[in-house]
Each structure stands twice: as C-alpha cells, then as structure tokens.
Amino acid sequence: MPHKDSDTESTPSAPINLKDVLIGEPLKSDRITEEKYSVLWGLPILASDAISSVAYAGQEVLLVLIPVIGLLSYRYVLLIALAIVGLLTLLIFSYRQTIENYPCGGGAYIVAKDNLGDMAGITAGASLAVDYVLTVAVSISSGIEQLTSAFPVLHPYSVPICVVLVLLLMLGNLRGIRESSKIFGLPTYLFAFSILILIGTGIYKYMTGAPIEHVVVASNYYGVGSVSLFLILRAFSNGCTALTGVEAVSNAVPNFRAPESKHAKRVLMLLYLTILGLFGGTSVLINLYRPTPGDGQPAVLIQLADMIFGRGDVINAIIFYFITGTLCMILFLAANTAFAGFPMLLSIMANDGFVPRQMKQRGARLGFSNGIVILTIAATILIIVFRANVTNLIGLYAIGVFISFTLSQTGMLVRWFRRRGKHWGFKALLNGAGALVTSLTVIVIAITKFSQGAYVVIILLPILIFLMKKVKNHYTALSIQLHFDEAHYANPTLTTQKYRNRAIVLLSSVNRASVRAIRYASTICDDVTAFSVVIHADVEKKLVENYRKLNNSIPLIVKHSEYRRIVSPLIEYIDSAEYDFRQGDMITVVMPQFHVTKWWQSFLHNQTQLLIQRKLLQKYHIAIVTIPFQLDDDKEVLANAKEEAKKKSALPEEPTKDS
C-alpha cells in the first residue's frame, strides 16, 4: 500500500485509549473547583493515616514492654497512651494556627521556610516527603500483615500483594481528587464504626462480667526485667506512630472547597476527636483484655475482636470478620493520605524551585500526577527491599514527621515573636511547648530507633536536602541566563537582526523519509547541504549513485568515519573552512524520524538520532528539526505487498521481438 504523505489526509477514528479507561477522560481546567474536598469526604481521605495508626500503635508499644516487664506492661500502656494524646492535643491546636496563617498549604515546609529560612524549609519538606513514602510502605505492609494473620495461606505472597495494592492506589488517585475521595472515603468510616462497636461491646462485656470468647495464652506474659526510663521512652517512640498523618490537613488546605481554611480546620478537629476516641478506647481494651503481640500471634486488634466476639455463632462471626475486613482496608487506605499530601507538598516546593517543575503540573484529571507516580515508585522500592516487614519498616517511621513537627512549631513560635498580634502570648506558649516536646521526641526516636533503621533516614535527609539545593541553584542560574531586561529590548542586534539560516540534511540512505526531509529543508532556506557519514566504501558508492538520480541542485557531502563515529565528522565539517561557517549563521540540522504504530517498535529506531541531538544541542548556533515519517501497520503493509506481488505474477509476459 503506498504511503500517504499528505498532511491534509483524514485520519481514522482514534482507537480506545487505555489511559482513559484506567483513569478516566481528561477534565477541563475550569473544573478544578468541582474536584476539591468537602468536609464529609476530606476527613476520611486526609485522616485515614492518623486513624489507621490505631491498628498498630498500641501493638508497637506492647512489643517493647512485654518481653521486659510482662503483665506490668498493660498498666503502662494507658500512661503512654495518655502522653501521646497530650502531645496530639498540642499538635492539633498548633496546626489550627498554621491553617489560619498559611491557607495556601504546605504545612511545616511553608511555615519553616517563611520564618526560619530556606534551609529549615527544605529540611521540613524533605522530612515530610520521606514520611509520606514510609506511610505508604508501612500502611500497606501492616494491612497485609493483618490479613495474613487471619489467612496464613497468603503469607508467602505478601510482597507481590503489597505492590499490586500500591499500584491500585496510584490508579485510584490518578482518577482525580473527587473520584478518589469517594472510592477511598467509605472504608475509613466503616473502620471507625467497627472499632467503636469493638470498644463499646468490649467495655460493656467487661463491666457486666461476660466471659471472654477466646483467651490468648502466651509465655512472654512473665517478663522479669525492671521498668526504666529508657524502656518507657522506647515504648513511647513506638507509640508515636499514632501521630503520623496529623500534618496532612495543613499540607492540603488548597484542596478544600471555599472557604478552604474553615473546612480544613473542621476536618482537623474531627480528626482529633476520632483519634482521641479510637486510640483511647483501644488502649483501654488492651489494658482490660491483655492481648499479646508477637511472632505467630494475630494482630492485637484481631485478638481483641476474637476475645470480645469470637466466631462461635453466625452473628459474632460476621462482626469479627467485619472488624478484620475494615481493619485491613483502613491500613491499605491509610496510604491514601500520603497520596493526597505528597503530590501537594511537591507542587508547592516546585513553585519555589526546590524540586523539578514537572511536580507542579496537573495531570489529565487535575491531580498532581507526577507526584503520585514518584510516590508509587519510591514506596514500591521500599516494600520490595524490606520484604513488606512492618517491624523493619517501623524503625524508619515517625522520625521524619517529628522533625517536620518540630520545625513547624518553632517556625510558628518565631512568627508570634516577630508579628505579635491578638493573644500572641498564649499562641507562642502553645507553639513553644509543642516545639519543645516534639524536639525531645525526635531525640528519643533517633536514639531508641537508631539501630532499627532510623539511621537510614538520618543519612537520607542530608542527601535529599543537598539535591534540593542543587535543583534550586540550577533554576536560579537558568533564570539569570534567560532574563531579558530593558537593555536587551533596546539592543537592535537582539530584537531586529535576523539570523542567516543554513540547513544540513542528515542522510543514512536515499529513501522516502530522507527525501521528505530534503523537501522540507528547501522550504526554510536556500543554503541546503545533504550530509552523510559512511563507514564502508561500497555504501558510499551506492549512496552517491542513488542521490544523483534525485536530480536536484542540493550538494551531497560524504565523510568517512574510520572509528565509526557519527557526530564528530558532522561537527568537524561545520567547523571546517569547507563549510565556511560565519558568525551570525544559524545552522538547522534536519533529520528524518520514523513514527511507529506500536510502542515497542520505537526501540528499534531513532536511537542514533538521540545521540546526535544530545551532542549537537551543546552548540549554540545549531538548531535541530526532526521530520516525522508515519509508518503504517506492519500487517497491513505486508498484506498489501503480498497482494501486489500476486497481481504482478498473474500478468501475462509481454512478447519478445523474436517471437
């Protein structure tokens, strides 16, 4: 079938786009207001991480205490829970002030940058970014751990299941803020409802003396160690995972419907009340029923559900599996808080030039798609490297978010001293207390979890900060070099003088694509040269013969390359006296490029072209133009060629002169 060169030719209807099927059709920019959160849907999306911490915060405290002090651990669980709730209260009221004063989002990053300087800002931003990645890895891994404790047959497949779930979360979030909130919001409400049933029934049964349905017998009830400050601090640092996710609302204020600050503050208070009820209630249940975490034991909340409801009759079994199911779902969806906060954080940092500018571009569904994809890749790598092991991952967790907490509180404290205002003394006291407590918590976490993996984050953060500063320096240098001021406007050389354009068409052979490139070059200037690099003499001979048949006035220059180099001979020719390059000349290098019909076919073509482009673009006076040559479908071309061959073979031979 002959190839269609005409640009005016009608194109066939577009095939089904897989991207549109997976994430939906593109949305117009003016629909951005429709894609924002209401309070009803903003709460489950932005609070799912903090709420999900209920599932493992108490368990992590017990894992530290029970092997050392045995049954005495349950008394200290309540005390540690009270300390964590006190810290939570400080943070919540501090972040309310952050939302009031910084309604454009960014949370700890923007507060630290505005009040403490760029270094503090990017430290907070890097810390939050690390925490968001760990949130995805820990939440998904923890959810699978809960699932495999109920269904042990799935345990060998933990890592691939985790990876699949992260990819599903990515697809859900790529569908846009509004749609993802509806997909992921309902399970959060179901989890909160199921835990309230667990707490209410558990306290009622204990108060009425109802028998425990299932008793866990564990040898590690009888620890013989002593209570020490270091032990309590270790347990406290583990329990502080209950506070991760609190900052998400302040980071994502612009994602709320107007008035943004008002709705964000409502969500923050609802988040506080929810965590207070769920975390406090489950801590009481742990003290009353004494579940025991550890290797071979189900997760603590599943043990509590088994003790309180059991699986002896249909109704209790339904409730037990309902709690187990919503527990797994909330742990999976806790990662969604990171998918809401991480891309927004990167977009704000991209506006300031600390991360690549692609991070602030909205995708087809008006979400920050590049940030979503980056988060997916980073979390997937962590899950694979740590084999979806929550105990290994938890050592890296929380330190990043508490560094951001500290910088945020310190930044707000400095702000009140600088600007003062109404009730500034009380506000400064609140933020000062928050800064002191969170900074002490950072030190505790760094010391107690250093050997468990916190050293990885401590090493990683300076690297990220260094890279962010390098990105900022590049964008600053770029801005300086591109700046066009009044002196430039007044310079006639820059504003009125035209380039003398010359064109060089690169040929590998004479074919329809290269002829099309020559035709194009003839339209942009009169000074056109065809240029080819050959390695073998026989190739040169054939090329020259075929080029002569074109019968055009454009000269052909052929250069031999003894070392099989392509770009060097071209650059040497341009710089040589033979080409006679003069100051002010702009050389346009024209290259044909195949446009293939299948994605995998692109790997079979144009690789040399990429090398040529990279080398030539280093020259100030060279522009590159690629002329696409659209290839037809292979099957169609081969079928038409076969049909043409049949027609030719069916024609009778012409009689010779002798016959």
Image (cartoon, rainbow, N blue to C red):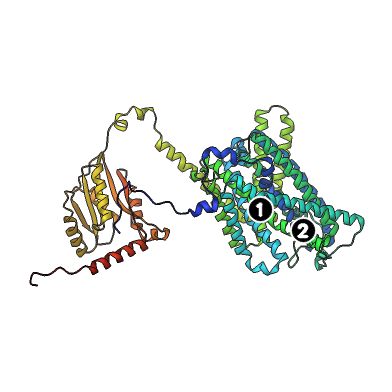
Residue type at the position of mark 1: Leu
**For marks 2 and 1 on the same chain, the one whose residue lies earlier in the sequence:** 2
Residue 491 vertical position relative to residue 165 in the rendered view, above or below = above
Residue behind mark 1:
333
Cα distance between the residues tagged 2 and 1? 17 Å
Q: Considering depth in this image, is 465 or 185 the residue closer to the camera?
A: 185
Query: Which x, y percent locates residue 546?
Result: 19, 58
Residue 514 vertical position relative to residue 433 in the rendered view, above or below = below
Please identify the quarter of the rendering in which residue 507 is found: bottom left
Query: Which x, y percent locates residue 655?
Result: 13, 69
Q: Secondary structure at mark 1?
A: helix
| Circle number at residue 301 | 2
Q: Most extreme residue toward the bottom, as rendered?
A: 659
Q: Considering depth in this image, is 233 or 10 the residue closer to the camera?
A: 10
Query: Which x, y percent locates residue 239?
Result: 74, 53
Residue type at the position of mark 2: Leu
Q: Considering depth in this image, is 411 or 185 the residue closer to the camera?
A: 185
Quadrant location of the C terminus in the rendered image = bottom left
Residue 174 vertical position relative to residue 419 in the rendered view, above or below = below
Please identify the quarter of the rendering in which residue 525 is found: top left
Quadrant location of the N terminus in the rendered image = bottom left
Q: Considering depth in this image, is 472 or 277 the residue closer to the camera?
A: 277
Specify whether 636 is left or right of 283: left
Q: Is residue 127 visible?
A: no
